[in-house]
């Protein structure tokens, strides 16, 4: 069974992302591991001494956060297996070790609605150490089914294992999957017939999914291109590779606690 790991810092953004991850887990028949990176203060009621009539309320730190997952999900939603673990003392290396040890299929992280550099976990360091993609979910993204997802890449360097991973994801959502070609900096535009030859020969024939499509995006302004991909082509989920071509221009030098304002849909980032 696949495992989806949720990085939980007890924020509203994390709760929102966790609900989406639950939808993902149900579609993919995956289990969920809730990785709690921050301890919380829980109110505890304790009876007064004999003869007293008042109860006292105080807060204590709960290291294991027992039952915390039940506060994030409706009981009626708890179909996938859900476990949780306290990793509040862990650094990025230890979190990455946990992710890889559990052979995670995907890691999910909620993103703040406002531009911020604050993040308890350095996501850039984490991505350099894990073997599965990281799904970043904007707080403003509505909880809904994925109907269209798009892998943004230069088709000449598009990776077959990633397309196969995405085809499996798309199939379970009954969604359209497209490869959006954006020429890498310094490379000429790709000719349409050559692009079709690559797409049909290297991908369509080698990926078992009949809803795989190709878009040759010729717009040179990357901001405009992203707007076309999200709003013009109505994609619900973007896919990029951290170390490749357009990532830094779209996201910036590093991933912070929020996504750029023009990225209004979840972003799935592959580390390789």
Image (tube, grey):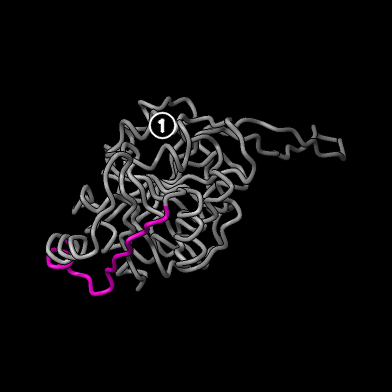
Q: Quadrant of the C terminus?
A: top left
Q: Does the magenta segment cover residue 208?
A: yes
Q: Which residues are magenta?
A: 203-219
Question: Image height check: is 113 above or below 144?
Answer: above
What residue did someone put label 1 on? 124
Residue at 16% x, 60% y is: 198
Residue at 69% x, 38% y is: 44
Q: Where on the picture, by quarter, is residue 127?
A: top left
Q: Does the magenta segment cover residue 228?
A: no
Question: Image height check: is 68 above or below 233?
Answer: above
At which x and y percent is residue 265? 50, 56
Secondary structure at badge 1 equals helix
Q: Quadrant of the N terminus?
A: bottom left
How many numbered marks, from 0 up?
1
Residue at 25% x, 55% y is: 190
Q: Is residue 115 left or right of residue 168?
A: right
At which x and y percent is residue 34? 45, 45
Question: Image height check: is 32 above or below 100?
Answer: below
At which x and y percent is residue 17? 52, 52
Q: Is residue 257 left or right of residue 135?
A: right
Q: Is residue 50 left or right of residue 150?
A: right
Residue at 32% x, 31% y is: 128
Q: Nearer the viewer, residue 55 or 252?
A: 252
Q: Nearer the viewer, residue 159 or 44?
A: 159
Query: Is the residue marked by circle 1 packed among few (<14), some (14-19), or many (20+) residues within 10 Å?
Result: some
Q: Nearer the viewer, residue 120 or 188?
A: 188
């Amino acid at each position: 069974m696949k495992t989806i790991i949720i990085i939980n810092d007890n924020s509203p953004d994390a709760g929102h992302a966790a609900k989406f991850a639950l939808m993902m887990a149900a579609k993919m028949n995956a289990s969920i591991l809730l990785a709690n990176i921050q301890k919380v203060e829980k109110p505890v009621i304790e009876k007064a001494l004999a003869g007293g009539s008042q109860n006292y309320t105080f807060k204590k730190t709960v290291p294991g956060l027992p039952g915390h997952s039940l506060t994030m999900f409706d009981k009626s939603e708890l179909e996938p297996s859900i476990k949780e673990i306290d990793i509040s003392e862990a650094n990025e290396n230890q979190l990455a070790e946990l992710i890889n040890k559990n052979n995670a299929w995907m890691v999910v992280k909620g993103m703040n609605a406002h531009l911020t550099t604050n993040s308890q976990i350095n996501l850039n360091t984490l991505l350099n150490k894990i073997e599965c993609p990281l799904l970043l979910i904007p707080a403003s993204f509505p909880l809904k089914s994925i109907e269209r997802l798009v892998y943004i890449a230069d088709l000449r360097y598009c990776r077959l294992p990633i397309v196969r991973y995405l085809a499996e994801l798309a199939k379970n959502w009954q969604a359209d999957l497209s490869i959006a070609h954006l020429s890498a900096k310094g490379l000429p535009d790709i000719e349409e017939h050559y692009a079709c030859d690559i797409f049909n020969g290297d991908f369509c024939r080698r990926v078992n999914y009949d809803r795989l499509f190709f878009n040759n995006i010729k717009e040179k302004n990357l901001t405009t291109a992203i707007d076309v991909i999200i709003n013009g082509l109505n994609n619900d989920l973007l896919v990029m590779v951290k170390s490749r071509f357009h990532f830094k221009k779209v996201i910036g030098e590093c991933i912070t606690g929020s996504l750029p304002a023009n990225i209004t849909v979840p972003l799935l980032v592959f580390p390789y």
